[in-house]
Image (tube, rainbow, N blue to C red):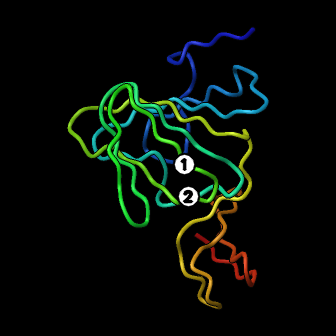
Amino acid sequence: MEKVTVEDLDAEGMSDADVRRLAGPLGTSDVAINHYTLAPGERFSGGLHTHLDQEEVFYVLSGEATFERPDDEVTVGAGEAVRFAPGDFQSGYNGGDEPVVALALGAPKASEDVRVKQDCPECDSDEMRFVPAEDGFTLVCPECGTELDA
């Protein structure tokens, strides 16, 4: 058994939000668990994206988060959860005046095929694969292999 206190973990992440990653300290093998605290205007991630190899569930502990999809959006309040299947494009943010505290769960734990909605400049693909790099990330077209530095 492993036990952690969220406040004892270092904040990290790719957004301005306070993100505490629980999976590593808990030693989970099959699920990613992240604790988010979003100030008004902050986002869960950089923008509209999907994981082709992972489903995600967001459970809002306090506040009210808005999740966007290509054709609609949904507001999720305290005590509510939302699920995105593999391949569902989504992005979430705090559009309110109060902080949002939420848990994000992803399964399987590792996601290696993350896509963003962006047209490839060389072919008809309307999405690019997000590939982490040491100094940021690269976008790679899954259809033709074109690379864009971001």
Quarter of the C terminus within the rendering = bottom right
Q: Nearer the viewer, residue 87 or 130?
A: 87
* 117 in relation to 68, above or below: below
Q: Amino acid at mark 2?
A: Asp
> On the image, numbered disc 2 is attached to which residue?
88
> On the image, numbered disc 1 is attached to which residue?
84
Q: State if disc 1 and disc 2 touch (CB < 8 Å).
A: yes
Query: Distance from label 2 to label 1 (Cα)?
Result: 6 Å
State the residue lying farthest toward the right: 29
In percent of width and height, residue 62 lies at 34, 26
Quadrant hosting residue 123: bottom right
Q: Amino acid at mark 1?
A: Phe
**Residue shown at 57%/79% (left/top)?**
126
In percent of width and height, residue 94 lies at 32, 43
Q: Is residue 88 left or right of residue 47?
A: right
In percent of width and height, residue 100 lies at 34, 33
* 139 in relation to 8, above or below: below
Q: Is residue 78 left or right of residue 90?
A: left
